[in-house]
Image (tube, rainbow, N blue to C red):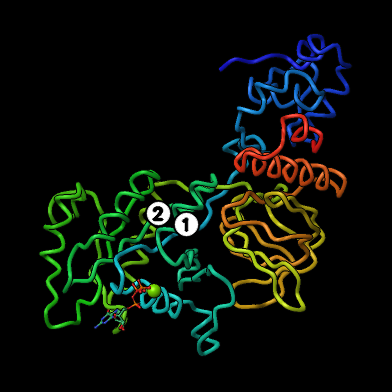
Amino acid sequence: PETITVQELANRMAERGTDVIKALMRMGVMATINQPIDADTAELVVSEFGHNMRRVAESDVEFSIRREADAPEATQPRPPVVTIMGHVDHGKTSLLDALRKTDVAAREAGGITQHIGAYQVNLPSGQKITFLDTPGHEAFTSMRARGANVTDLVVLVVAADDGIMAQTVEAITHAKAAKVPIIVAVNKIDKPGANPQRVHQELLQHELVVEDLGGDVLCVNVSAKEGTNLDKLEEAILLQAEILDLKANADRQAEGAIVEAKVERGRGSVATVLIQRGTLKVGDVFVAGAEWGRVRALLDDKGNQIEEAGPSAPVEVLGLNGTPQAGDEFIVVDNENQARDIAEYRQAKLRQQTAATSGRGTLEQMFTQL
Ligand code: GTP
Ligand code: MG
């Protein structure tokens, strides 16, 4: 892609280099004077300074302030993040409930109530698996459309008496588009009409060849109702996770994605965040989409107050100044000024997009909002 250094861009606009660096910072881009930046970013800087507005209005650049990747030696293994998908009534919710009950802590406490739209199962081996409780592949797709690839693998639930149905095929398509590996859970094997072998055969038509048929797709026959083979399903998930070599650096400012967010009476805006790297701590200042805040309290998936949360942990965050959207990026920044600047910039950009799509207002009006 085309690039231009910060210095050159400043020269062309007859602006000071330090002012350009400041403008970039407001957009969440940290750059030095000699650093090349891409054309889309440059266009936005240009618009910030009031030059050449026409081209910018046509560009549609999504800003991410995610930082560089970690050096491999700074990373440690992290738990897999799993989304369960499948046709209506094939047992997604039942399976999530049954898996939740395999949590060692839950067993000790004699059952737990889920507080947030994601939970983590602690296995007897000490390993963990994070499950996202998405209501279906709409959530999966809309989160992906917003740039949040939070799922490491998909468990595809297929009822053994029903076989592959329309939404099973859709789920396969979505998982493949996201390049996320699929593990098949053939559910309801306790039912009289259950025929797992038929499901294995049907999967062939969708290029999913299970191990029994000589392929490499992990497949487990389960009953969510009777709790059959849940340990085998968890083993398969961990095996697939090992193949994926999932790692993250826990020792840095947290980054993650909003799983869900809403306003709750007496608590303000509350978000469920999936931490993807780093460790989130009480008191941290963050940006979440076009909103920002300071962590007032953190709660785990069992509703316990915690001080910090590391990679792959789902956590409820209090202390937002507004309500972000599912799929929005969550990132800890250095201070409130930076957080406010980035959030304001993004809000202005959202207003600009809204104005553009609704066809109201002139270009000049749009940019005075910046
Ligand atoms: P939607 O959220 O509506 O798409 O359904 P779902 O996929 O979450 O299915 P759900 O878990 O609600 O289960 C649908 C029905 O199947 C319920 O009546 C469950 O009790 C039943 N069911 C789920 N798993 C099993 C199972 O392993 N065996 C039997 N016999 N019934 C099951
Ligand atoms: Mg359900």
User: CB of mark 1 within 8 Å of CB of mark 2?
Assistant: yes
- Nearest to viewer (mark 1 / mark 2): 2
Where residue 36 appears, x then y in whole percent? 69, 17
- Give the left or right position of residue 231, taking residue 285 as reference: left
- Give the left or right position of residue 313, taking residue 166 as reference: right
Earlier residue among tags 1 and 2: 1
Q: Looking at the rendered structure, which numbered label has been put on residue 63?
A: none
| Quadrant occupied by the C terminus | top right
Name which quarter of the figure residue 57 lies in.
top right
Nearer to the camera, 262 or 150 = 262
Task: Say what secondary structure mark 2 lies in.
Answer: strand
Task: Say what secondary structure mark 1 lies in.
Answer: loop
Q: Which residue is mark 1?
A: 80
Ligand 2 positioned in quadrant: bottom left
Residue 38 vertical position relative to residue 81 in the rendered view, above or below: above
Nearer to the camera, 239 or 16 = 16
Q: Amino acid at mark 2?
A: Leu
Real-space CA distance between mark 1 and mark 2, rounded to the nearest whole angstrom: 8 Å
Q: Residue at x 54, y 44 (%)?
A: 147
Q: Which residue is mark 2?
A: 153
Residue 237 vertical position relative to residue 181 in the rendered view, above or below: below
Q: Amino acid at mark 1?
A: Pro
